[in-house]
Amino acid sequence: MKGLVAFVICAALVAPVAAAAARPTALGQAERLSGLSARRPIRTVTESSARFDADAVRVLDRGYPRSLQRVDDRLYAALGLLAAGGSTRALMKASVRTIDALYDPAAHVLRVRRKPAPTRAALVYELVRALVDQNVGLRRISTLRARDRDASLAANSVVDGLASLASGRRAGPQRGSTIDRFLWVERTAGLGPGRTFVAQLRSVGGSFAVATALRTFPQTTEQLLHLDAFLDRARPLPISLPARVDDRALQTSEALTASETFGELDVRALLRAFSLPPSDSVAQGWGGGRLALYTGADDAATVAVAIRWRSADDFAEWRAAAPALVASAFPAAQERRCPAVDRCWVSGDRELALASSGDLTVLASGTAGELVAASLAR
């Protein structure tokens, strides 16, 4: 009888241990499902909500400097995504408050909010990012945003795609204002296109193919969205932006103040923000793109979206979609005849113009929309 009691007690003690051993730790899950091994312990710091939010904002600003955020606000306003003089700063800070774990690649630290504690999925997600950092390095892409918007989106989406597959995290529904919907497409790119990209790579070449992609990264979101473009290393078509555009007759001059790459994912986000179908079909003809900010003597802004297209059909599809984009972004815009461009509209003191040449289209919006569009399309 005593032996039976001893057996029952031992079984009762061993069963929880066996159950715990059967379920891997968050790090074990991250290693097994990512295919990456920890090379050293991952330092984890638990922080109060106030400290966590402050550190998360610092990580955001390190990779996306405040000066660039202000430039983007002007670009977004000219595209009708944001009210004139508006800012995305509050939206970005609000998004930080929705996360409870964050890997900081500069400090090589996993930061965890004390209350509410992160879910297991959130921990696994950030642990995968830490493993990527230990194996191939994340600092080289953490500051890429300031140099190449499109390459930054592509590279970070691969890392987040791997983390999404390992953790099971997926993007929530797209909702909110126009700017919310635009930013959502970019913010969740890793949970959608990035996840798909990594899954496709695994099916083609296994873990070796994924590891190679983490070392070389897609150079554009076109390569991210189309695996064949990545495997072929399809290069974006170049776009030349003049440093200054002038109208001697009107004695006006606009100087190039800032420019960024504007990729296929950006085109998709822009069209989706205004619920314009078929956004993905139009965007997939992208061959190269830049977003340019021109300012006059009074600092009045004109923004141009310059895109080169892969085929004549892609070119025609964008030209057909552009007027609907103008109507959605600026409902009060009235079309008028402008000899220097293909089509143009006026909304208050804003000129909107669509011009084209060869495989290049230019959509400009601002006080000098017609001048900038015509000059860039020459």
Image (cartoon, helix red, strand yellow):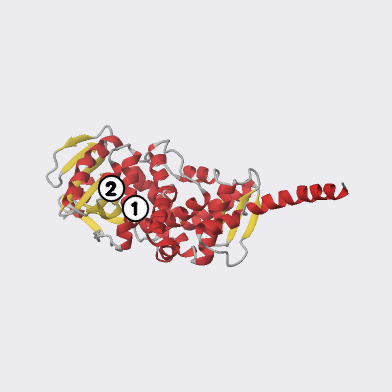
Relative image position of residue 125 (x, y in whole percent): 53, 52
Residue 109: percent from left, percent from top: 59, 59
Which label sits in the foreground, 1 or 2? Answer: 1
From the image, tell me which residue sits under label 1. Answer: 225
**What is the distance, in whole Å, between disc 1 and disc 2 at their CAs?**
10 Å
Judge by depth and name the residue closer to the eye, 83 or 191: 191
* Amino acid type of the residue that numbered disc 2 sits on in the rendered structure: Ala
**On screen, 99 above or below 109?**
above
Is disc 1 surrounded by few (<14), some (14 to 19) or many (20+) residues within 10 Å?
A: many
- In terms of depth relative to the viewer, which is nearer, 272 or 370? 272
Q: Residue furthest front?
A: 1
Q: Secondary structure at mark 1?
A: helix
Q: Is residue 51 visible?
A: yes
Q: Nearer the viewer, residue 70 or 211?
A: 211
Question: Residue 212: which quarter of the image?
Answer: bottom left
Q: In the image, 40: left or right of 231?
A: right
Q: Can you say whether 93 is above or below 230 in the image? A: above
